[in-house]
Amino acid sequence: MSSEKTSWPEVVGWPASAAVTQINSDRPDVAIEVVPAGTNVAPGYNASRVRVYFDAGDATGPVLYTPVVG
């Protein structure tokens, strides 16, 4: 079983930029997509991607959901 981190529940509520910094620190091997909540994205699993959904209507841009690999 891999010991690589695959989810970041601790970043929910953080500004998206800080979440990206943390995820990149933990997993520099994945591409991070920062996406406004409600945006349509292509479906499908990708082990090299993490999507960070944030509230674009809030000036701080907080992360709304737990970012996960996929």
Image: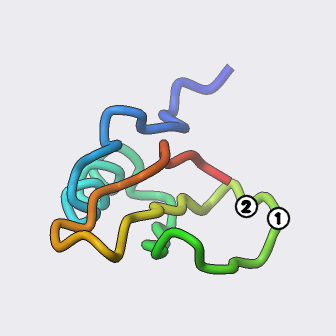
Residue 52's place in the image compared with 67, above or below, is below
Q: Which quarter of the rendering shows the N terminus?
A: top right
**Residue ranking furthest to the top:** 1
The residue at 39%/64% (across/down) is: 54
Kind of residue indicated by mark 1: Gly
Q: Nearer the viewer, mark 1 or mark 2?
A: 1
Q: Is residue 13 above or below residue 61?
A: above
Compared to residue 41, the image places residue 15 above or below, namely: above
Q: Quadrant of the C terminus?
A: bottom right
Who's the residue at 48% across and 42% down the image?
66
User: Would residue 38 appear left or right of 5 to someone viewing this image?
Assistant: right
Residue at image location 73% in from the left, 61% down from the top: 46
Work out whether residue 39 or residue 46 is closer to the camera in this orientation and state it.
Answer: 39
Q: Which mark is residue 69?
A: none
Query: Furthest-right residue in view?
Result: 44
Q: How far is the residue under mark 1 from the one under mark 2?
A: 7 Å
SS type, badge 1: loop
Please tell me in which quadrant of the rendered image residue 11 appears: top left
Residues packed near mark 1 inside 10 Å, few (<14), some (14 to 19) or many (20 plus): few
- Residue at numbered disc 2: 46
- Secondary structure of the residue carrying numbered label 2: loop
Q: Are marks 1 and 2 in contact (CB under 8 Å)?
A: yes
Q: Residues within 10 Å of mark 2 (few under 14, many from 20)?
A: few
- Numbered label attached to residue 44: 1
Q: Amino acid at mark 2?
A: Asn
Query: Which residue does the image show at 62% across and 26% down from the upper left?
Result: 2
Residue 16 in the image, given as x and y percentages of width and height: 28, 63
Left or right relative to 35: residue 11: left
Q: Position of residue 53 (x, y in %)?
A: 47, 63
Where residue 61 appears, as percent x and y from the top left, is 26, 67
Q: Residue 55: horizontal and vertical position, in percent?
A: 37, 66
